[in-house]
Amino acid sequence: MTNVAPRARRAHPHRAMLPTHGRRHNLSLILQSLYSAGPMSRADLARTVGLTKVTVSDLVAELLGSNHAVEVGPAAQGRPGKPATLVDVNRSGLQIVGVDLAEHQVLRAAVLDLDGTILSRVERPVPPIADAAVDPREDPVVRAVVELVHEAIAAATAPLLGIGVGTPGIVGPGGAVDTAPNLGWDDVPLREVLHEATGLPVFVSNDADAAAHAVSTFGGGSDDMMLVKIGRGVGCGLIVGGQRVRGAHYAAGEIGHVTVGTDNGSACRCGKSGCLETWLSAPNLERLLAEADPDDPERPLRDGGERLAIAIAPVVAALDLEEVVIAGPQGLVGDVLLGQVDATLRSRLLARPATERVVRRASDPDDIVLRGAAVLVLWDQLGVA
């Protein structure tokens, strides 16, 4: 037996806190409380976050000075004396650019307010994917993304907090796309390219991760859930105990290129055969539906749902997930596919009451990545989500 030295544990910076980190944490507490509860007086904030009135007043003054918070008027008169002034997150005075690179026909971007409301949209067709490796800055898709972001920035009507991007593929901690077979990308420094082009803070995430953040923040998602995103490819985002699971190599949820079954299947762009994406990505599923037997036109939807459930059943069981949320084109993700996923999961998992696990469609599938990309910016810049 070979002796293998144990791998060193990764450092976890949040385990140690400098004084400056403590102040940043308290500022985040204030903003988080306001974002969740709405306008509050300084006295109510102090009671909510457990800090003194003097400390809260000091923190609120800093947030007003940075334009991250605003005074919104007096509280309703409830007792004698001058009414307290209410403070809120600057919901309409700051904006975010969200970018979605996961659709199989278009590149999409939008300007959003801090509540995730889309204020304006821009789109560009996906250019031809490069056949051979090129300088990332000369890649036709990268150039199109830069142009798209500039167009979105021009549509903003308030100061921008930053740019959030949801992209297919594996995204490293520095915002570089390590690999995205469906875009022909390897080692594309997307965050760096967009920051250099705009001067704004940029945050890049896998598209399914971004979608999971959107459901968790805006869509009523549970603390233990899987979000499956069907688009140009197939991926999933995992929320466990209220925290996003990233994995040792930042590739948690990369299920699209998992071989499903023992019947080989079709050739995949990644070079393997029988990947989940060959049954379930939007382009492949649309093609299979077009070629389906007229006597059984829904067969591709059932096959895709079954293959998806086979791929995720071990994860759902191992993590005891409460719900599986599926986001994708409305014409594809409907009762047939959802019903097959649910039925196959039930046949492969320990029997439980029907109320204990839910398979459902995302409530806002068309904009879920755009809104999730905005959450990335909200969390990093304001500490709220």
Image (cartoon, rainbow, N blue to C red):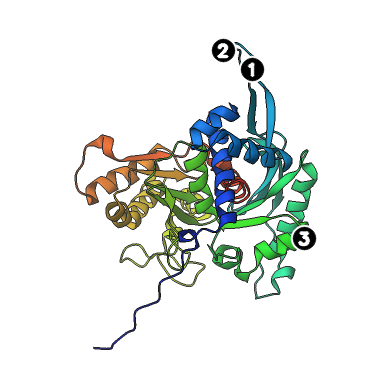
Query: Taking 73 as reference, is 61 above or below it?
Result: below
- Above or below, comparing residue 2 to residue 383 in the picture: below
**Quarter of the view holding residue 154:** top right
Looking at numbered disc 1 in the image, what kind of residue is underneath it?
A: Pro
Residue 197's disc number: 3
Please say if the residues under marks 3 and 1 sit with CB atoms less than 8 Å apart. Answer: no
Callout 1: helix, strand or loop? loop
Confirm whether residue 54 shows in the render. Answer: yes
Q: Which residue is mark 1?
A: 83
Q: Identify the secondary structure beneath mark 3.
A: helix
Residue shown at 78%/49% (left/top)?
A: 151
Mark 3: few, some, or many residues within 10 Å (few <14, many ≥20)? few
Q: Does label 3 or label 1 sit earlier along the sequence?
A: 1
Badge 1: residue crowd in 10 Å (few <14, some 14–19, many ≥20) = some
User: What's the residue at 75%, 46% (across, down)?
Assistant: 152
**Where residue 220 sits in the image (x, y, percent)?**
45, 36
Left or right side of 233 for 315: left
User: Please, which residue is most extreme toward the right here?
Assistant: 154
Q: Dot 2 corresponds to which residue?
A: 78
Q: Amino acid at mark 2?
A: Gly
Cβ atoms under marks 2 and 1 closer than 8 Å = yes
**Residue at 48% across, 37% down:** 50
Q: Earlier in the sequence, mark 3 or mark 2?
A: 2
Per the model, the C-alpha gap separating discs 2 and 1 is 8 Å
The front one of 226 and 69 is 69
**Is 101 left, or right, of 341 in this rendering?**
right
